[in-house]
Image: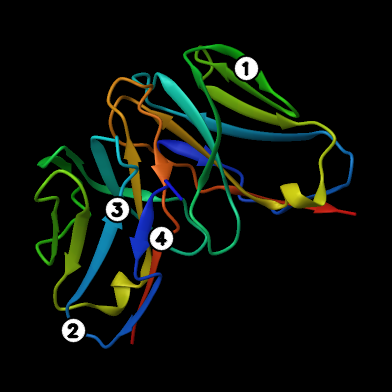
C-alpha cells in the first residue's frame, strides 16, 4: 500500500499525559499536513511542512503541540499535558508541490483523553 | 461566520436519485475546489477537484464552481447505498485546505 499511513490508529490516555503520533506520507510527496477533526465538524488545519521545514502553523496549535519532520519523510505530532479538549481525530495528509496541491489523507489517529 | 459553509444534513434520498450537495465560501483567494468523501471513522478520500470556475465530470460525479457567487456544488447521479457518507467541500488557496463542516448523505435501497 503506497498511501498515507498513521500510527497508532487509536489512543486512549489520561489527562496530563503526553502522546505522540506518527505519519508516513506518500513516498514522493514533499508536503505533509496535520489536521484535527472533532465529531460532526470538518478537519481544521494545524500545520504543514515542505520537506523538513515547518512553513505554517495555525493558532489552533497551542504551545503544548509540537510537530517535526526531521528528515523530510515521516512526521510526528506530540501533544504534551493532554486535556480533554484534545480528544479528536488527528489526520495527516501529503501532497506534491505544483500538482494542484491535491492532498491525500491517511486514516487518522483517534485520540480520547480521559 | 465560517469561511466555508455547508448544510450538515442529513440528506436522505432513495437509491437512483440525483443528489445535489452545496457549499458557499467567503475567501476570494480560493483557486482549487476539492470534494472529499468520508466514511464513518475513516480519513477523507479525495473525490475530485476543479480549478477556478466551471464544471468537471467524473463518472457519476459532477463538480461545479461559480466564483462570482462563491458557490460550489457536487452532483451525484444514480446514487447508490455505497455513496452514503459525509461529503466535505474544501477550497484551497495554495497551502492548507479550508473544510466545510460536511453534509451527511444517506442513500436508502
Secondary structure state at the residue bearing disc 2: loop
Q: Chain of mark 1?
A: B
Secondary structure state at the residue bearing disc 4: loop
Q: Which mark is residue A24?
A: 3
Real-space CA distance between mark 4 and mark 3, rounded to the nearest whole angstrom: 11 Å
Real-space CA distance between mark 2 and mark 4, rounded to the nearest whole angstrom: 20 Å
Q: Chain of mark 4?
A: A
Residue that label 4 marks: A108
Q: Is residue A6 above or below residue B107?
A: below
Of badges 2 and 3, nearer the viewer stands 3
Residue that label 2 marks: A17
- Residue located at (65% from left, 30% from top): B74
- For the residues beneath circles 2 and 1, the answer to whether they share a chain is no
- For the residues beneath circles 2 and 3, the answer to whether they share a chain is yes
Residue in the foreground of this view, choosing between B4 and A11: A11
Position of residue A79 measured from the top left corner of the image (x, y, whole percent): 18, 69
Amino acid at each position: 500500500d503506497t498511501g498515507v499511513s498513521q500510527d497508532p490508529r487509536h489512543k486512549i490516555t489520561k489527562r496530563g499525559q503526553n502522546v505522540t503520533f506518527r505519519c508516513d506520507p506518500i513516498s514522493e510527496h514533499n508536503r505533509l499536513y496535520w489536521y484535527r477533526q472533532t465529531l460532526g465538524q470538518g478537519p481544521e488545519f494545524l500545520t504543514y511542512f515542505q520537506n523538513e521545514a515547518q512553513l505554517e502553523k495555525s493558532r489552533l496549535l497551542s504551545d503544548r503541540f509540537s510537530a517535526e519532520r526531521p528528515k523530510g519523510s515521516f512526521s510526528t505530532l506530540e501533544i504534551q499535558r493532554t486535556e480533554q479538549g484534545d480528544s479528536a481525530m488527528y489526520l495527516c495528509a501529503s501532497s506534491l508541490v505544483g500538482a494542484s496541491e491535491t492532498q491525500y489523507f491517511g486514516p487518522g489517529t483517534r485520540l480520547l483523553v480521559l | 461566520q465560517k469561511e466555508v459553509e455547508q448544510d450538515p444534513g442529513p440528506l436522505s434520498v432513495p437509491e437512483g436519485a440525483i443528489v445535489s450537495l452545496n457549499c458557499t465560501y467567503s475567501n476570494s483567494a480560493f483557486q482549487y475546489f476539492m470534494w472529499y468523501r468520508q466514511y464513518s471513522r475513516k480519513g477523507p478520500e479525495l473525490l475530485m477537484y476543479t480549478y477556478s470556475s466551471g464544471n468537471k465530470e467524473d463518472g457519476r460525479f459532477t463538480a461545479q464552481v461559480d466564483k462570482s457567487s462563491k458557490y460550489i456544488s457536487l452532483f451525484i447521479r444514480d446514487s447508490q447505498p455505497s455513496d452514503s457518507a459525509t461529503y466535505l467541500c474544501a477550497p484551497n488557496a495554495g497551502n492548507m485546505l479550508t473544510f466545510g463542516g460536511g453534509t451527511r448523505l444517506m442513500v436508502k435501497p
